[in-house]
Image: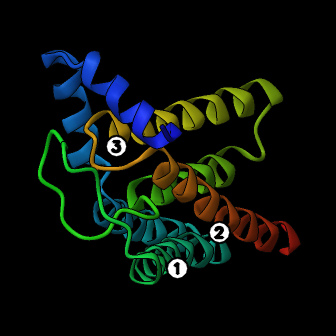
């Protein structure tokens, strides 16, 4: 039995109404399209604060991850689990929620907290990591993605995040 199937079956055994409700909340609030729209608002804010490079990198990174995920879904055409808790359409690999979350929260923490104290930076990165992991876990818990879909989303998102940070680091502040 593959790890994907084993994790999917395990999620069925720990199903309860509270965790389903929390996972549905994460599904709705942290949808990739919603994160891209919120990133537009944040980018406008950054632009108005004369942080143009940050604004461009943030928004363009979110658009790139959205497009890249859709391209990969069409290339791999992997089916979603059949026993999902909620309705989901399209292909499964990679998880758009997971990919968008790592870019969104990773860049958000980096841009807004990079010049803060080490303690504040660590706290921001910790909360970003927790949110990212909870979003990924919610996708598996609702059984709309396999574990490998979420890990693939984290990998793809991580690559875009790294490039975004490299671009920001090369800019002189």
Establish if 80 lies above or below 57: above
Cβ–Cβ under 8 Å for marks 1 and 3: no
Give the mark, 1 or 3, whose residue is nearer the N terminus.
1
Q: Is residue 172 visible?
A: no
> Quick one: label 2, few (<14), some, or many (20+) residues within 10 Å?
many
In this rendering, which labeled residue sits more in front, label 1 or label 3? Answer: 3
Cβ–Cβ under 8 Å for marks 2 and 1: yes
Residue receiving disc 2:
160
Q: Nearer the viewer, residue 7 or 105?
A: 7
Q: How many marks?
A: 3
Establish if 142 lies above or below 165: above
Residue receiving disc 3:
139
Query: Whole-percent x and y of residue 58?
Result: 56, 69
Measured in 3D between alpha carbons, the distance from the residue under mark 2 to the one under mark 1, in whole angstroms, is 8 Å
Residue receiving disc 1:
64
Quadrant housing residue 78: bottom left
Give the mark, 2 or 3, whose residue is nearer the N terminus.
3
SS class, disc 3: helix
At 41% from the left and 75% from the top, the residue drawn is: 73
């Amino acid at each position: 039995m593959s790890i994907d199937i084993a994790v999917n079956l395990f999620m069925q055994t720990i199903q309860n109404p509270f965790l389903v409700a929390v996972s549905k909340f994460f599904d709705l609030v942290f949808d990739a399209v919603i994160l891209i729209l919120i990133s537009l608002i944040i980018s406008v804010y950054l632009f108005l604060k004369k942080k143009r490079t940050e604004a461009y990198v943030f928004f363009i990174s979110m658009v790139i991850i959205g497009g890249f995920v859709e391209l990969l879904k069409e290339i791999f055409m992997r089916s979603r689990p059949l026993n999902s808790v909620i309705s989901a359409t399209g292909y499964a690999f990679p998880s758009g929620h997971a990919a968008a979350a790592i870019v969104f929260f990773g860049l958000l923490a980096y841009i807004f907290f990079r010049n803060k104290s080490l303690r504040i930076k660590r706290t921001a990165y910790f909360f970003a990591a927790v949110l990212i992991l909870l979003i990924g876990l919610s996708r598996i818990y609702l059984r709309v993605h396999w574990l490998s879909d979420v890990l693939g989303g984290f990998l793809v998102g991580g690559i875009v995040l790294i490039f975004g940070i490299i671009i920001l680091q090369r800019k002189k502040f």
